[in-house]
Amino acid sequence: MEFEQVNIFDEMEDELKPTEEELERNRRVQRELYGIHLNTRQWRTYELIKRNTLAGRTTTQREIVDNYPAPFYRDGYVWNDDPRTHDHCSTIWHDLDKINGQDNMPKAIIWDEDYNYKIAEDRDEADAFCKRMYWSKAMAKLWRYGNIMRKVNRDGQTRIMFTDETEARDYWQTFFHNHLDDLVNQSLGGKEDEGDSQ
């Protein structure tokens, strides 16, 4: 299924179209007042997805790439036509991760398995997205962590083995002997043995 790119600005009256200066002023105000730090490409992507969501539709990867293409912008998006890849522009994902990572950004961007993007309309939609994208990955990492810790705690995993008595003595003197003396002195209240003081 081929998607046709729709330029929403063509549907607006000319006097309603924001100029590049107005867009830049808006981005500067967002940075200064709210602490939102995004580059121009990320702002353009956010604004495109926001406009399309307000118009009641999702934004495809192709639309985002065409909105800020590499031939026209130094840091523009590049479309990957390789049929072996499922993601035709991984830079978009990194930008959306940066946008969603901004604490003061007023809206969250979500996407489906086909990389159709939109602004989350309610808490349930954002919650379902977070569970699909992050919860399962976090649980897999926690399971791996638990598995490693169980292995370490098995019989003999944490015991230190020495090949001869000299290694054991050196280890004892380095790590425990001094600490043991400190513990004994603390338990005696700092008192030295009376036999040693004479």
Image (cartoon, grey):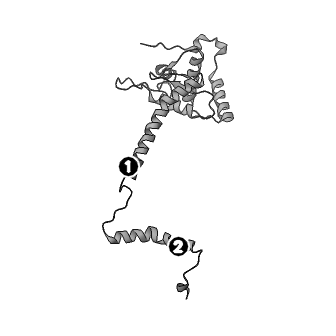
The picture quadrant where one finds residue 159 is bottom left
Q: Determine the secondary structure under disc 1.
A: helix
Foreground of the two, 100 or 131: 131
What x and y, as percent, mark residue 150? 40, 48
20 in relation to 103, above or below: above
Foreground of the two, 148 or 14: 148
Q: Determine the secondary structure under disc 2.
A: helix
The reply to whether callout 1 and callout 2 are in contact (CB within 8 Å) is no
Residue behind mark 1: 151
Asked if residue 106 shows in the view, the reply is yes
Q: Is 137 positioned to the left or the right of 197 in the image?
A: left
Position of the N terminus by quadrant: top left
Residue neighbourhood size for the residue with mark 2, other residues' Cα within 10 Å, grouped as few (<14), some (14–19), many (≥20): few
Q: Residue furthest bottom?
A: 198
- The three-letter code of the residue at mark 1 reads Lys
Foreground of the two, 186 or 49: 186
As measured in the structure, the alpha-carbon distance from the residue carrying label 1 to the one carrying label 2 is 34 Å
Asked if residue 44 shows in the view, the reply is no
What x and y, as percent, mark residue 154? 37, 52
- The three-letter code of the residue at mark 2 reads Val
* Residue 175 numbered tag: none
Position of the C terminus by quadrant: bottom right
The picture quadrant where one finds residue 147 is top left
Q: Residue at 57%, 75% (x, y): give it.
A: 188
* Residue 184 numbered tag: 2
Q: Is 173 positioned to the left or the right of 186 in the image?
A: left
Q: Is 24 positioned to the left or the right of 193 in the image?
A: right
